[in-house]
Image: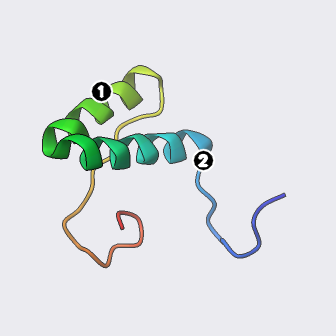
Amino acid sequence: MANPSNSDPMDVRERIARRLQQVGITVGGETGSRIANRISWAIGCGRIELCDDPACPNCA
């Protein structure tokens, strides 16, 4: 059952990729972000590109 408070639920793979990206940035900055993208791509979750807009709901 989908979460009623969220009209556009994320795919599990996208959620994993975004979490890896968040951890990579927190731990290693830009280098960690690149490593996280390689890992998420290797396990089949795709790559995440973050924008510079702090108000972006997808990147915040």
For the residues marked 2 and 1, what is the alpha-carbon distance in whole angstroms? 19 Å
Which residue position is annotated with label 1? 38
Q: Amino acid at mark 1?
A: Arg
Image quadrant in which you'd find residue 47: top left
Report the residue at 40% width, 31% height from top: 40
Q: Residue furthest right?
A: 1
| Secondary structure found at label 2 | loop
Query: Left of 22 or right of it: where is 14?
Result: right
Q: Nearer the viewer, residue 32 or 4?
A: 32
Q: Is residue 28 above or below residue 4?
A: above
In the rendered image, residue 36, in percent from the top left (x then y), is placed at: 31, 34
Which residue position is annotated with label 2? 11
Q: Is residue 22 above or below residue 51?
A: above
Q: Residue furthest left?
A: 30
Considering the image in quadrants, where does the N terminus appear?
bottom right
Report the residue at 34% width, 73% height from top: 56
Q: Residue furthest top?
A: 42
Label ID, residue 58: none
Q: Could you tell me if the residues under marks 2 and 1 are in contact, i.e. CB atoms within 8 Å? A: no
Question: Looking at the image, how many numbered discs can be counted on the residues?
Answer: 2
In the rendered image, residue 10, in percent from the top left (x then y), is placed at: 58, 54
Front position among marks 2 and 1: 1
